[in-house]
Amino acid sequence: MSTEVSFDDESSFTAAISDVRSDASDISYVICGHFDGNPNLIGVLYTGSDISEIGSKMDPTEAMYGLVRYETKFDMSTTIKFVYIHWIGENLPVGKKGRYGVIHGSIESRFSPYHLLVEASSPEDLDPSKILHTLMESAGTKSKVIESDQNSHRQMRGFTQTQLPQRDRKANFGVSAVSTKGAEVEILQEVFEAVSKVRSDVDPVMWMVAGYKDANPKGPLQCMGSGDGGLDELKRCLQDVLPMYGLFRVSHKDADDITTVKFVYIVWVGTSVKPMTKAKISTHKGTAEEVFCPAHVTLYASEISDIVERDIMEKIKSQAA
């Protein structure tokens, strides 16, 4: 039996995922399921804008998969978070459960990246308030840069001491908080140093990018570039075949003509990254966020055209309003 999945209509799935990830779209979720009981064939079943209706869409006799967009508040800013739903219905036959389980890795990679994995078997597991609560807890992860000895007394630029998030790693109701912890991956000291420079008030470095050494998704993460040349310089570091992580510093002038520093966290999964690599690195989200977050804007991109400074500044401006 093949462990790879294909879509009944690839273009429909791609469009639905793009809609969920787009700030300009009203579509906030997509739900997919198997066609004709075939473990290797799935397709889009539902899309919609009301996340409270997702539980009612789930079939208790089937396995289903979804991506949902949530909005969370942090530092008086709105941040977009993505939740991957792995639904195993309470009445799913054991035989089907085994066959579907074999190909789940292939399916999950198509919904990556995401912040939180929810494994659900009843509509109550998909209560938006519960999921939002867990996302908010996950967002309370401190940066390892701040926790290091040499930076233990330095306040993070762009955040007051009372705004710094507090760690709380609890997860409930069958939710795996991937972004809170996930799989461990080694992070070289040079990455921490580059992040520290971006956050420093006295260093001219505006950006840094980290990636997997030798393109191996098992790690370690190494620094692949940094500089003071702005976003265009950062984008030249990104490679289609690699998953990468970036931190970018911008200055924003508010309505009172006060300039503040904002940080943008970029999660890059190039268009040529292999599905199995996507699946592997999706488990590293929590570890990566501990290094690169907190941030005022989180941006997921797979093409250079997804990273537009004007759009980033508009997000920052709207959050500050």
Image (tube, rainbow, N blue to C red):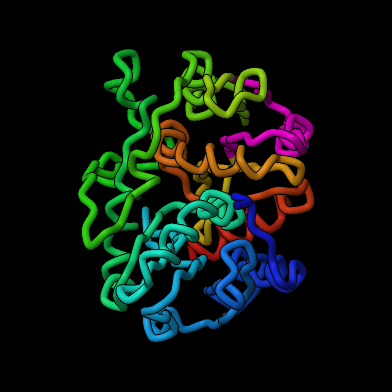
Residue occupying image coordinates x 59% and y 50%: 3
Q: Which residues are magenta?
A: 223-249
Answer whether residue 277 is magenta in the image: no
Answer whether residue 237 is magenta in the image: yes
Whether residue 16 is visible here, answered yes or no, is: yes
Residue occupying image coordinates x 33% and y 24%: 154
Q: For this view, does 110 lie left or right of residue 15?
A: left
Q: Residue 239: horizontal and vertical position, in percent?
A: 76, 33
Q: Residue 56: horizontal and vertical position, in percent?
A: 39, 86
- Res 317 → quadrant: bottom right
Choose between 240 and 123: the one closer to the eye.
123
Residue occupying image coordinates x 62% and y 75%: 44
What is the tally of numbered marks visible in this picture? 0
Q: Is residue 302 placed above or below 230 in the rendered structure?
A: below
- Res 276 → quadrant: top right
Q: Residue 57: horizontal and vertical position, in percent?
A: 44, 84
Whether residue 298 is visible here, answered yes or no, is: no
Q: Is residue 230 placed above or below 15 in the rendered structure?
A: above
Q: For this view, does 79 lie left or right of residue 231?
A: left
